[in-house]
């Protein structure tokens, strides 16, 4: 995305035609008042400088259309991934909601279990107390009384535990309700994002054919040799084949260009490529 931003920034002006116009004359280049001279092939880049060079304005317009096309293709490639990521975020949020619900169910299950044990303890105590009136043996009477006492202590303990369990259930329920509200709000936001991204994706797909047509229209104004060089660089780089030179720096990779290259750019004498990234260079004339 930094490279794409650099491409957009480098096209910030409409670039009026400079004082040195390049005129196509087969494999020769001439400027106003100059004799035609043969094109020069750079052994490193393979670019024939001065061989059928299109005007700067035409080349910049083509690069603009390619920048828009690149952005559309990036959206079409990246938006589905982002939508899928949002789906995963929603699933994670829903899992947190289910976990909160599970904690509430566990707390309530513990409460019900304790209440069941309390009911059993009370029933056993009542049964033991009912036996006291029919016991004639002192030893048996004392044994049953001890059993009743043990049940009473157990009942006291269980009653305290039930109260604590009730408080725990109330606390967990409040947490569950708060978590449910948070998850619902977050899910609503995610769904809104997904709807917007889906709309952006459809808009990008709908614009792709039109943008391809705009690019083809921009290609008409570019001569065959320049088009071949441009397309080769664009295929290699993927994002941009052209860069604006400000002062002496490539607008994309920021490499400082040799004085000879800068001078040729200022004079408009054929295609020049960046010494670092290999993109076609266009001179940004000072205002």
Image: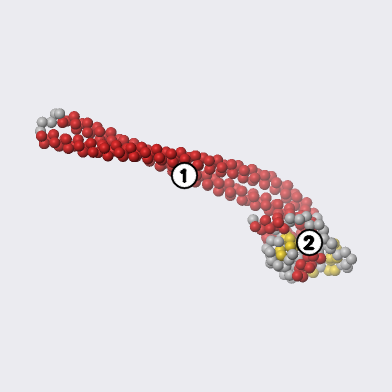
Look at the picture and state if 159 lies above or below 215: above
Local secondary structure at mark 2: loop
Q: Quadrant of the N terminus?
A: bottom right
Mark 2 or 1, closer to the camera: 2
> Mark 2 vs mark 1: which is more N-terminal?
1
Location of residue 28 in the rendering, given as x and y in whole percent from the top left corner:
84, 66
Location of residue 140 in the rendering, given as x and y in whole percent from the top left corner:
12, 35
Q: Which residue shows up at 72% across the image and 58% down it?
A: 10
Local secondary structure at mark 1: helix
Location of residue 242 in the rendering, given as x and y in whole percent from the top left corner:
73, 60
Q: Is residue 2 left or right of residue 224?
A: left
Q: Is residue 100 left or right of residue 136?
A: right
Q: Which mark is residue 285?
A: 2
Q: Can the viewer see residue 219?
A: no
Q: Which mark is residue 231?
A: none
Q: Quadrant of the C terminus?
A: bottom right
Q: Quadrant of residue 163?
A: top left
133 or 1: which is nearer to us?
133
For label 1, the residue is: 96
- Crowd rating for badge 1 (residues with CA inside 10 Å; few <14, some 14–19, many 20+): some
Residue farthest right in this picture: 33
């Amino acid at each position: 995305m930094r490279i794409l931003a650099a491409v957009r920034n480098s096209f910030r002006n409409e670039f009026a035609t400079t004082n040195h116009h390049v005129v196509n004359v087969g494999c020769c280049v001439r400027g106003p008042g100059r004799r035609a001279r043969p094109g020069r092939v750079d052994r490193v880049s393979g670019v024939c400088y001065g061989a059928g060079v299109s005007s700067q304005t035409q080349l910049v317009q083509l690069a603009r259309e390619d920048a828009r096309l690149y952005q559309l293709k990036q959206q079409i490639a990246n938006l589905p991934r982002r939508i899928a990521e949002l789906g995963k975020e929603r699933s994670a949020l829903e899992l947190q909601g289910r976990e909160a619900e599970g904690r509430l169910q566990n707390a309530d299950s513990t409460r019900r279990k304790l209440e069941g044990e309390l009911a059993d303890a009370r029933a056993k105590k009542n049964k033991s107390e009912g036996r006291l009136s029919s016991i004639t043996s002192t030893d048996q009477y004392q044994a049953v009384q001890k059993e009743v006492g043990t049940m009473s202590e157990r009942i006291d303990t269980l009653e305290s535990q039930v109260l604590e369990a009730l408080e725990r259930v109330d606390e967990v329920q409040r947490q569950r309700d708060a978590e449910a509200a948070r998850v619902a709000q977050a899910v609503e936001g995610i769904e809104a994002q997904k709807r917007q991204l889906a709309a952006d994706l459809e808009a990008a797909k709908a614009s792709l054919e039109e943008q391809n047509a705009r690019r083809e229209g921009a290609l008409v104004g570019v001569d065959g040799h320049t088009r071949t060089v441009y397309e080769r660089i664009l295929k290699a780089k993927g994002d941009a084949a052209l860069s604006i030179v400000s002062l002496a720096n490539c607008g994309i990779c920021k490499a400082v260009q040799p004085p000879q290259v800068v001078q040729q750019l200022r004079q408009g004498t054929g295609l020049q490529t960046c010494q670092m990234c290999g993109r076609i260079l266009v001179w940004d004339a000072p205002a």
